[in-house]
Each structure stands twice: as structure tokens, then as C-alpha cells.
Amino acid sequence: MPELPEVETTRRGVAPHVVGRTIAAMRVYDRRLRWPVPAGLEKLLAGRTIERVDRRSKYLLFRLHEGTLLVHLGMTGSLRIHRHAPARRTHDHVDLVLDDGTTLRYHDPRRFGAILWTPAQEGEHPLLRELGPEPLTPAFDAAYLWRATRGKRAAIKLALMDNRVVVGVGNIYANEALFRAGIRPGVAAGRLSRPRLARLVDAVREVLTEAIAKGGSTLRDYVDSAGEPGYFQLTYRVYGRAGAPCRACGSPVRLLRLGQRASFYCPHCQR
Ligand SMILES: [Zn+2]
């Protein structure tokens, strides 16, 4: 599933090819995504210029004149730039054809992604309104996380993965950040001291920044490439390593189920 680093890499991969371009035509081959692609969107978008491409949580925001196109990649969605679009393949659902002939193509085998429209320039879509801060912005700091977790009995890992607390920290990155911060995933969020939360904030930033940096090497794959998106992986320290020796101390990594998600931790390094 594309996580924040993959979505951010997609943004960096496609933005240089679409910003400043005008949409000549939108072609929808299948509207049945997670929510239907709005009827009449083709007419609405034609002739509009893409001013910017932003990201909020895992949504790509194509800022047009007076309106925003929201794109979510769901579980298997991907975007590709084609200078000369090849014949449509199975699961290619939407094309945005730009005024220079470039095509931005949306591909999604499982169709859990979304392509939606909001007239608000700042993307005040209901899906975005309740979201917590971005993990890589100054708004996500120890003081904020401390306030956001006071009185919470929920496990810190679940709090980290809660979009109302902070966006874009999926299962893999939550596991890895907690390991780096030396915090067990099941500890009640409200019991963690401010210094420990400060370490956690740093660890979250670190793992996401490293993953985005890895994605940088795949940027060219967004242009004229027929392949599926590459998932760039960090060398995981605990994620997916139940029973394997901790890379720091050698103790076997443990597996714990928290809110249906697999949590991995080192009983020696994490308290
Ligand atoms: Zn360890």
C-alpha cells in the first residue's frame, strides 16, 4: 500500500511535468473507484491550468484555478507521466491529457483509490478537514504530541496511526519509529513523558525522511515507464522480523497484535 513516502515521491515525480500545463481533456474509462469519479468532471476540468501539486496526508492535491482535484492512490493506485501515451492497459482508469500532449495516467487494479473534486482552493474537502498535522512540519512537535495524548489510554502505536493525531504514519513507519525511540508499541499514550515523546517525534521524522530520500532514486520511473511503481524499502529494524535477532542487541523481535495490526518490538531495547 502506498504510504506517505510513496505519495510524496509520486508528487515530486509528476509535478514538474504537469505544473503550468492546461488540461486539454480528461478521459474516464471506469468511474468505479472507492467513490465514483464525479459525473461531469471531464467538462469541469477541461481548459483549467494546474497551478501546483501539493500533498496533504496521503492525498495528492492538484491545485487548479478555483478548485482542487484530489487523488488518493488507495491500496494499489499509481500515476504515470507519458509523453506519448501507449495503448490503455487493463486497470488504467483515468487519463488527464495536457496541452502539450503529455498524459497523466491513473492505474489501479483494486480500485480503492479516489479521484474527487472540491471547488475550495485550499482543499477544504470533508475528507481533509479533520486531519491532524503533517509529521514533517513544525506543527508536529513534542509539545503538540504531549497535549494530544494526555489522558489517552490507547496504545501509543494506535495514537501514532490515528490521522486525527498525526497524518501519514502507517503501520511500517509506526513500528520503526517506536523502535528507534525505545518505546514499546503497547504503552498507553497518556503515560509517556514529554522527553520520550520528543524522541518519538524525532524518530517519526527520521524514518519518513529516510524513506522519501530513498524514493528520490525512483523519480525517473514516473515518466514513460510501463512498470508498476517500485516500493522503496528501508532496511527494517523490527518490521516483519518476528523471531529474528534485534539489530541492536540480538534479542528475538516480538510480535504483538494491536488493533488488528502487527506490531513488532524488541523487549530489551523498547520499554
Ligand atoms: Zn534490542
Image (cartoon, rainbow, N blue to C red):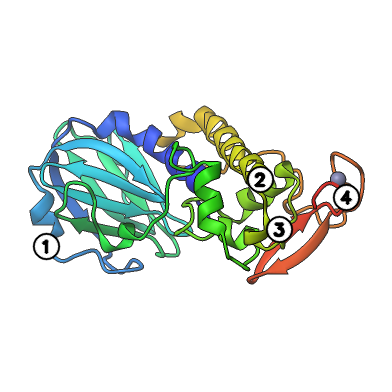
Mark seen at residue 185: 3
Q: Is residue 201 left or right of residue 108?
A: right
- 10 Å neighbourhood of mark 3: few (<14), some, or many (≥20)? many
Instruction: Identify the amino acid type marked 3.
Output: Pro
As rendered, which of 56 and 1 lies closer to the eye? 56
Q: CA distance from mark 1 to mark 2?
A: 43 Å
Closer to the N terminus: mark 1 or mark 4?
1
Q: Tell me the SS state at disc 3.
A: loop
Residue 113 x %, y %: 38, 60
Tell me which residue sits at (73%, 46%) in the image: 179
Which of the 4 image quadrants contains residue 94?
bottom left
Q: CA distance from mark 4 to mark 3?
A: 13 Å
Q: CA distance from mark 2 to mark 3?
A: 10 Å
Q: Nearer the viewer, mark 3 or mark 1?
A: 3
Q: CA distance from mark 1 to mark 4?
A: 57 Å
Q: CA distance from mark 3 to mark 1?
A: 46 Å
According to the picture, the residue beneath numbered tag 2 turns out to be: 177
